Image (cartoon, rainbow, N blue to C red):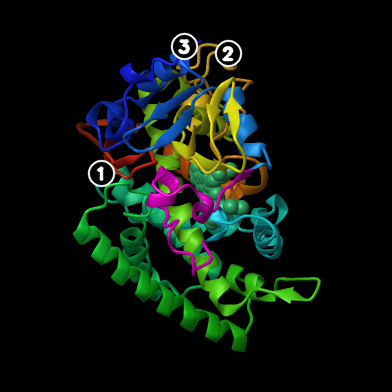
Amino acid sequence: MKDMGEELPKGIALTVLDEHYKSNPYAILERIRQTTPLHHDDELNQYIATRHDDVKLILRDKDYWSDPRKGKQGSFIYELLGGANKEEEPSMLLMDEPNHKRLRSLVSKPFMPSAVEKWRPRTQQVVKRILDSICEPEFDLIKAFANPIPTVVIAELLGIDASHHDNFKVWSDQSVKTAFSPFPDPEDLRVAEVAQRKLDDFFLKEIEARRKHLGDDLLSDLIRAEEEGDKLSQHELILQCNLMLIAGNVTTTDLIGNGMKALLDNPQQLQLLKDNPSFIKNAVEEILRFESPVLNSARIPNRDTDVQGCPIGTGESLIVSLASANRDPEVYPDPDRFDIEREDTHHQSFGGGRHMCLGAHLARLEAQEAILAIITRFPNITHSEKGLVRATVPSFRGMESFWVTT
Ligand code: HEM
């Protein structure tokens, strides 16, 4: 296997800021996957693994770090995710042991499948309310449906009063826009900082109110959470609330939007689902495989190592392409075919190992309820001539708008 890195795309061409990559990342990822197990992008100073088995192993390998402060100065993760900021402990996603283990065990209970299942009726109500608000026969499915669902669900689960939902959504959207962008717009950055401050103040007030009256909501669950006498501090609670927004909103919106697009692009599959609503769980897994809402995750080797014989040094940035792993023909026959009856729907879209997505069950539940409800409410739903616009949030695959008619 020869690394023909020179000829492979690099830098911005490997992000959704590039038009080719944005419209079809899979063709570009396939070229890389066929050429080398480890592509070195010397423009952004990152290494990229694209093959399914390598991605799966790296995500689960305990000998990789996630904390950008341990990265090599100048490497992609160090520069993008604030490696120079030695003072502040990063959020859980970027934390290493032992701190990650402590935090994860404190917050994980409310996200277990059985705990999440209790939110299904409330999620159904949110979805119904949002569907009731759609009055036009032609509408933007992202703006009117996929976008509000995750924020309203998480706001409801946290016990936030409905009168604050609109503000909450605006701040959350603004704060996430620049979160993973290698080339953030300075004005977006300024807006994100202001939104972040407003969110932090808001969460602080909510936490203070809950401490006085604990209730039957997720924020109260997190305040109650206690492991062997240990509890979350005020600062940790605020960080955790923010992480749920950053990690859970755009991603779940994209899952619902990508899923509806895949179904409308494949009318026989849509019909199959309408005829067999019980296929919804498998359908959502296939959507996750087929159009991973998160394109990449990342790790930092804690030693000089290699991926299939291609060397990578301690502290370098190792990007794992979840989208590419999910379309690897070595694992998925005919990977570009969308098939809700597929048996091999296991995917890497929620990452893996100790950082495996905490909100995976919640995201699945929301997508299952949202997709079933909208195809039931609008049995003739189809593409509108107004088309779609793809989103440009780096590392995410989704749409800014997607017009449908009913
Ligand atoms: C379709 C929706 C979602 C997708 C595709 C997704 C994907 C991911 C991915 C790829 C990771 C990194 C895993 C790794 O590097 O191994 C992650 C981590 C995380 N996600 Fe999600 N996510 C989704 C929804 C959510 C939701 C709804 C929440 C919470 C409300 C959430 C909370 C988190 C948290 C807290 C982490 C960090 C976990 C840790 O570091 O231990 N995610 N997610």
Residue 139's mark? Answer: 1
Q: Is mark 3 within 8 Å of ligand 1?
A: no
Q: In the rendering, at what x and y percent does residue 392 appear?
A: 28, 42
**Residue that numbered label 2 is attached to:** 330
Q: Few, some or many C-alpha atoms within 10 Å of disc 1 (few <14, some 14-19, many ≥20)?
A: some
Look at the numbered discs 2 and 3 and tell me whether their residues touch, using CB distance below 8 Å.
no
Element carrying mark 3: loop
Q: In the rendering, at what x and y percent does residue 260 appear?
A: 40, 34
Q: Residue drawn 25% across and 33% down?
A: 18
Q: Is any atom of residue 246 visible in this view?
A: yes
Q: Is any atom of residue 367 visible in this view?
A: no
- From mark 1 to mark 3, how far is it between C-alphas? 49 Å
Q: Residue drawn 39% across and 41% down?
A: 395
The reply to whether the magenta stretch includes residue 369 is: no
The residue under label 1 is which amino acid type?
Answer: Phe
The reply to whether the magenta stretch includes residue 66 is: yes
Mark before the other along the chain sequence, 2 or 3 = 3
Q: Quadrant of residue 282?
A: top right
Q: Is residue 67 left or right of residue 190?
A: right
**Residue that numbered label 3 is attached to:** 2
Q: Quadrant of residue 220?
A: bottom right
- From mark 2 to mark 1, how far is it between C-alphas? 39 Å
Mark before the other along the chain sequence, 2 or 1 = 1
Mark whose residue sits in front, 2 or 1: 2
- What is the span of residues highlighted in magenta in the rendered image? 64-90
The residue under label 3 is which amino acid type?
Answer: Lys
Q: Nearer the viewer, residue 107 or 166?
A: 107
Q: Quadrant of residue 236?
A: bottom right
